[in-house]
Amino acid sequence: MGVFGPYLPLWLQAQGLSLNHISLLVSLQALTRLLAPYGWGVLSDRSSQPVTLLRLTAFAALVCSVGLWLAPFGLGQWWGAAWLGVVLFLLFMNTSAMSPLNEAALVQWVSEEGRFDGKLYGQVRVWGSLGFLVAVLAAGRWFEGGGMAHLPHLTSAMLLVVLASTFALPNVHNAAQGPQPRPPVWPVLRQPLIAWFFASAFFHVLAHMGVYVFLSLYLDALGYSKTMIGLMWALGVVVEVGWFLTQGRWLPKLSLAAWLVLCALATVLRMGLTAGLGQYLLALLLAQALHAITFASHHSACIAILSQHFAGQLRGRGQALFTVIAYGVPGVVGGILGGTLSSEFGLASVFWASLAVSLVASACAWRVWLLSGKHSNF
């Protein structure tokens, strides 16, 4: 993701595509998060073999990435853009499944007697952040010197490494197999506290879609170099690493619901700084440093909540629902609306809209906090 995520919009821009086309193609990842994760989550709960499924999706993603090599030769024709859309859709159908499968396996590894170990989770999760950090910096320097043409080849190379790493993972069973029927997920979702939790996660991530899809384009338009763009992404990951390494100390200081409120309010500040003061390096550095709270601490709090309320044979479906509701739907909505806003009013308007959405996320998180008084594990 460090190679592909931040630089895909710039690669598409280098192929001559418009902002609307770029936003549509990038939002395909979010669209697949509506379709792929829950199906793979059901398979994970049914088979109790998330690692095996992770290997399958990694292999399929590698095969699909080869199709990106052919896309630039036809982008001047309608069929070239259509080919690229198909390739990205199939690629994202597999990569979108990898995150919930990996999280389901990881939560099982770091849970002892059904209790989520936040400190151990952070110590493992930090390696994903470090991998992103190395990749985004190295890719930024590479693209600065050699242009964007090699993005497809670097993507395939990294997916090959991902596939190899999945075969080094120990197998894990995310639920005990047996003749008993799988518990239904709907009764959990109907609980008001859980419903408001998913609402807060939806709006929280929707507020971040401006960063995930348009930040590189926005900084490029403001005159920042590709190396500096990579450094901005890297700064977010550095503070993210710091959080994951020390979250065992900080996470217990507040309730999980209180963390949701704090993260949402920090997002309001982050989007305001990016939209209004993005041309000033110091303000942009502060905005990116807030990633430790707006993403890392929010993610840990959400995973802890999911581990408590979607345990055992609900784990795979719980992680998949989180991916769909908190990333899939917001990604589609944010990508398409962001493309429209940026085309009509400029890229800064996307971040002003993100500020407004983060206020809604704050209200939902506040509702979770009010309801959490009856639940000691919140």
Image (spheres, helix red, strand yellow):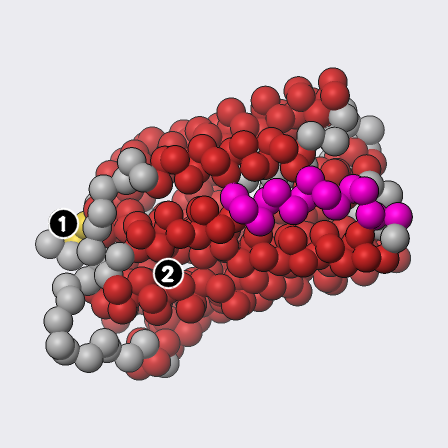
Provide residue 170's location: percent of width, then percent of height: 23, 42
Image vertical order of residue 133 relative to residue 256, above or below: above
Residue at the image point whose x is 35% and y is 55% from the top: 53
Within-10-Å neighbours for mark 2: few <14, some 14–19, many 20+ = many
The front one of 71 and 173 is: 71
Main SS of residues in magenta:
helix
The front one of 288 and 272 is: 288
Q: Secondary structure at mark 1?
A: strand
Q: Mark 1 or mark 2: which comes first in sequence?
A: 1
The residue tagged 1 is 112
Residue 292 falls inside the magenta stretch: no
Image vertical order of residue 250 relative to residue 136, above or below: below
Residue at the image point whose x is 75% and y is 35% from the top: 219
* Residue 114 shows in the view: yes
Q: Given the image, on which type of amino acid does mark 2 rest?
A: Gln
Q: Secondary structure at mark 2?
A: helix
On the rendered image, what quadrant is the N terminus found in? top right
The disc placed on residue 274 is none
Provide residue 91's location: percent of width, then percent of height: 57, 52
Image vertical order of residue 259 relative to residue 315, above or below: above
Which residues, given as a range, are shown in magenta? 62-76
Provide residue 35's location: percent of width, then percent of height: 52, 68
The residue tagged 2 is 319
